[in-house]
Image (cartoon, rainbow, N blue to C red):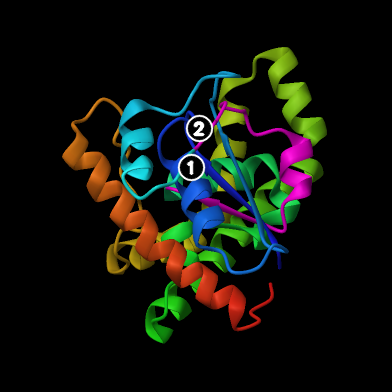
């Protein structure tokens, strides 16, 4: 694993900071990082707070924001988000590549018990996606018919069948999420420099763990 894509929302605060820290701290030219945003406008500079935080460590950055594109996604060997919601949004967009998509702090976790819970969580999420897709394929004729004829009661019955099918997995997910800590890195956008400093330190700690994990030869 050599190509890492960091993703946040707008690609102006957290993910470009993560990219800059990774590039600054890596010990092999074979390692590469890029960054993108789920809802990014194209061509915006890195935020002043992020720029100041990395410049304080002697890191210079000429960043222009990019949206998450299929080309960037396919370039990456692993995609690391700043929050769980971002991870889930990307998995919905690329369900076949779920095994490559993690939140950053989740991926560098070194706690066997929590890792087991996270793996169980991923499996239940995967089962929900699979069963929902299969159910809709098997019942597509009914869906089209009920929509065309506006048969509301039949639509509701079909929805209830799907919910009943998914309920055991959703219940398991809810239980696991109750036990799991948050792996989110908060968005410092619009905050003062102290908040950006805290975000930098949080990212730095996670990326040092990431580089150590990559150095130890961990493969997906």
Mark 1 element type: helix
Q: Position of residue 31 (x, y in %)?
A: 67, 62
Label 1 crowd (10 A; few <14 / some 14-19 / many >=20)? many
- Residue behind mark 1: 15
For the C terminus, give its image quadrant: bottom right
- Residue behind mark 2: 11
* Left or right placement of residue 33 versus residue 182 in this view: right
Q: Which residues are magenta?
A: 61-82
Mark 2 element type: loop
For the N terminus, give its image quadrant: bottom right
Task: Give the residue furthest to the front.
Answer: 58
* Left or right placement of residue 72 versus residue 80 in this view: right
Whether residue 57 appears in magenta in the rendering, the answer is no
Query: Quick check: 139 above or below 141?
Result: below
Q: Position of residue 197 (x, y in %)?
A: 24, 46
Q: Position of residue 99 (x, y in %)?
A: 67, 63
Pick the front one: 7 or 193: 193
């Amino acid at each position: 694993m050599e190509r890492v894509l960091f993703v946040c929302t707008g690609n102006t605060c957290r993910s470009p900071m993560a990219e800059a820290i990774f590039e600054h701290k890596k010990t092999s030219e074979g390692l590469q990082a890029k960054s993108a945003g789920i809802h990014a406008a194209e061509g915006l500079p890195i935020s002043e707070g992020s720029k100041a935080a990395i410049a304080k460590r002697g890191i210079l950055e000429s960043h222009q924001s990019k949206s998450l594109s299929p080309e960037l996604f396919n370039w990456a060997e692993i995609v690391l988000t700043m929050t769980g919601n971002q991870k889930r949004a990307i998995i919905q967009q690329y369900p076949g590549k779920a095994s490559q998509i993690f939140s950053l702090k989740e991926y560098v976790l070194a706690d066997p018990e929590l890792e087991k819970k996270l793996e169980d969580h991923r499996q239940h999420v995967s089962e929900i996606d699979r069963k929902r897709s299969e159910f809709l394929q098997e019942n597509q004729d009914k869906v089209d018919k009920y929509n065309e004829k506006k048969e509301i009661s039949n639509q509701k019955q079909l929805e209830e069948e799907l919910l009943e099918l998914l309920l055991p997995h959703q219940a398991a997910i809810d239980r696991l999420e109750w036990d799991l800590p948050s792996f989110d890195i908060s968005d410092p956008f619009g905050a003062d420099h102290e908040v950006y400093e805290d975000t930098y330190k949080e990212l730095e700690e996670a990326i040092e763990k990431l580089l150590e994990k990559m150095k130890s030869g961990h493969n997906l």
